[in-house]
Image (cartoon, rainbow, N blue to C red):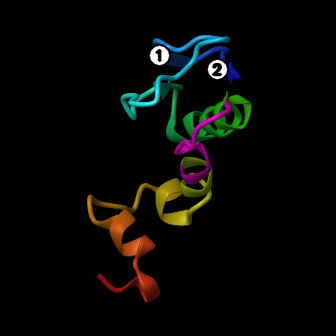
């Protein structure tokens, strides 16, 4: 089952569609969610809604990861760099 989100400021780039069968040796990028808005807060709100509406059954996705990340104060406030995720995922915040 594949049900992408939609609405104002929400776009999904994907070759998948409802009824599409993902081959066993698939490219890990099944789709890309793009969200835009007038400001960061609006964008994060749209992203939260879009991630909640996005349904991809049958494979693991990064939807839960991104849903969790947009709840993180550092991400919400824009206080992160290219090492943030690996630091965040490391035990006790150690690299």
Q: Secondary structure at mark 1?
A: strand
Q: Tell me the residue that label 1 is attached to.
A: 14
Residue located 55% across and 53% down the image: 65
92 vs 81: above or below: below
Can residue 8 be found in the magenta stretch? no
Where residue 2 appears, x then y in whole percent? 66, 21
User: In this image, 70 relative to 80: left or right?
Assistant: right
Direction front: furthest residue: 24
Bounds of the magenta segment:
56-65
Between residues 72 and 57, which one lies in front from this camera angle?
Answer: 57
Where residue 18 appears, x then y in whole percent? 67, 11
Residue located 63% across and 14% down the image: 8
The quadrant where residue 61 appears: top right
44 vs 74: above or below: above
Where residue 80 appears, x then y in whole percent? 36, 61
Q: Tell me the residue that label 2 is attached to.
A: 4
Give the CA separation, mark 2 to mark 1: 9 Å
Q: Residues within 10 Å of mark 2 (few under 14, many from 20)?
A: many
Can residue 57 be found in the magenta stretch? yes
Residue located 34% across and 86% down the image: 94
């Amino acid at each position: 089952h594949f049900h992408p989100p939609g609405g104002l400021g929400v776009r999904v780039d994907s070759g998948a569609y409802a009824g599409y069968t993902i081959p066993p040796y698939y490219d890990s990028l099944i789709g890309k969610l793009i969200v835009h808005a007038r400001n960061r807060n609006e964008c994060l709100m749209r992203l939260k809604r879009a991630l909640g509406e996005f349904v991809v059954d049958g494979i693991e996705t990064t939807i839960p990861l991104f849903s969790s990340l947009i709840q993180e104060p550092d991400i919400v406030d824009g206080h992160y760099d290219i090492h943030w995720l690996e630091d965040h995922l490391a035990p006790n915040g150690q690299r």
